[in-house]
């Protein structure tokens, strides 16, 4: 929806042109000895059209200031986003190493380790099979082997094992 308070460039151009034409006509009428009533009416018309034009210019200036302010806000948010991504990347890399070390401690095979990471990422067994170009039955057996070696009963317990210490206590 268009805000009716926005300065429409066409209206601004027309009102500016109108101000100039009324001003020139007023000067011409004055020099030719126009009547007082006519000059007063044209003067009022000039003042009114000048006010509309001035209001449009003011709105245009305010809009440009708002745009600059929003651009500045976007730049700050992008800087914060990049900083957060950098910090998060470092944390996630560290978490990934910790998970891999735990998988090694549990003596998971390389294939089971890969399946374990994919399960932690939330992929279904079928999606894991498709990504690894293996049969669904193979992935099912590998996931069961993971649960046996870890002593955990399910994917949610596997995820909870790693997330428990990251989240605040209940």
Image (cartoon, helix red, strand yellow):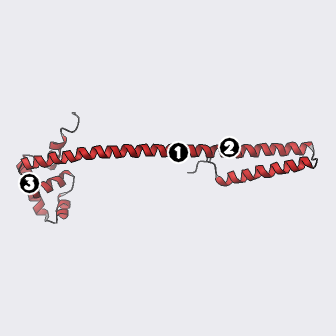
**Spot occupied by residue 105 in the image (x, y as percentages of width and height):** 7, 47
**Spot occupied by residue 2 in the image (x, y as percentages of width and height):** 58, 51
Q: Are marks 3 and 1 in contact (CB under 8 Å)?
A: no
Q: In this view, does 59 lie above or below 113?
A: above
Q: What element carries label 1?
A: helix
Outermost residue toward the top in this view: 170
Does any portion of residue 30 appear in the rendered image? yes
In the image: residue 92, left or right of residue 99: right
Q: How far apart are marks 3 and 2 (CA)?
A: 73 Å
In the image: residue 81, left or right of residue 36: left
Q: Where the C terminus falls, by quadrant? A: top left
Does any portion of residue 153 appear in the rendered image? no
Identify residue for label 3.
144
Residue drawn 14% across the image and 56% down it: 115
Q: Nearer the viewer, residue 52 or 156?
A: 52
Mark 3 or 2: the one toward you: 2
Identify residue for label 1.
68
Q: Is mark 2 on a helix, strand or loop?
A: helix
N-terminal of the two: label 3 or label 2? Answer: 2
> Is the residue marked by circle 3 packed among few (<14), some (14-19), or many (20+) residues within 10 Å?
some
Residue drawn 90% across the image and 43% down it: 37
Identify residue for label 2.
55
The picture quadrant where one finds residue 61 is top right
Q: Distance between the residues labelled 2 and 1?
A: 20 Å
**Spot occupied by residue 167 in the image (x, y as percentages of width and height):** 22, 38
> Is the residue marked by circle 1 packed among few (<14), some (14-19), or many (20+) residues within 10 Å?
few
N-terminal of the two: label 3 or label 1? Answer: 1
N-terminal of the two: label 2 or label 1? Answer: 2
């Amino acid at each position: 929806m268009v805000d009716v308070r926005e300065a429409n460039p066409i209206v601004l151009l027309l009102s500016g042109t109108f101000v100039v034409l009324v001003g020139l006509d007023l000067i011409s009428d004055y020099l030719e000895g126009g009547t007082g009533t006519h000059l007063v009416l044209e003067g009022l018309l000039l003042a009114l059209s000048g006010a509309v034009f001035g209001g449009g210019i003011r709105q245009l200036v305010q809009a440009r200031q708002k745009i600059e302010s929003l651009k500045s806000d976007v730049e700050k948010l992008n800087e914060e986003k990049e900083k957060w991504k950098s910090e998060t990347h470092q944390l996630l890399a560290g978490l990934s190493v910790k998970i891999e070390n735990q998988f090694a401690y549990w003596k998971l095979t390389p294939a089971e380790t890969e399946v374990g990471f994919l399960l932690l990422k939330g992929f279904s067994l079928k999606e894991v099979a498709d990504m690894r170009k293996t049969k669904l039955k193979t992935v099912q057996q590998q996931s069961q082997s993971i649960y046996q070696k870890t002593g955990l009963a399910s994917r949610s317990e596997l995820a909870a094992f790693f997330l428990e210490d990251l989240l605040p206590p209940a």
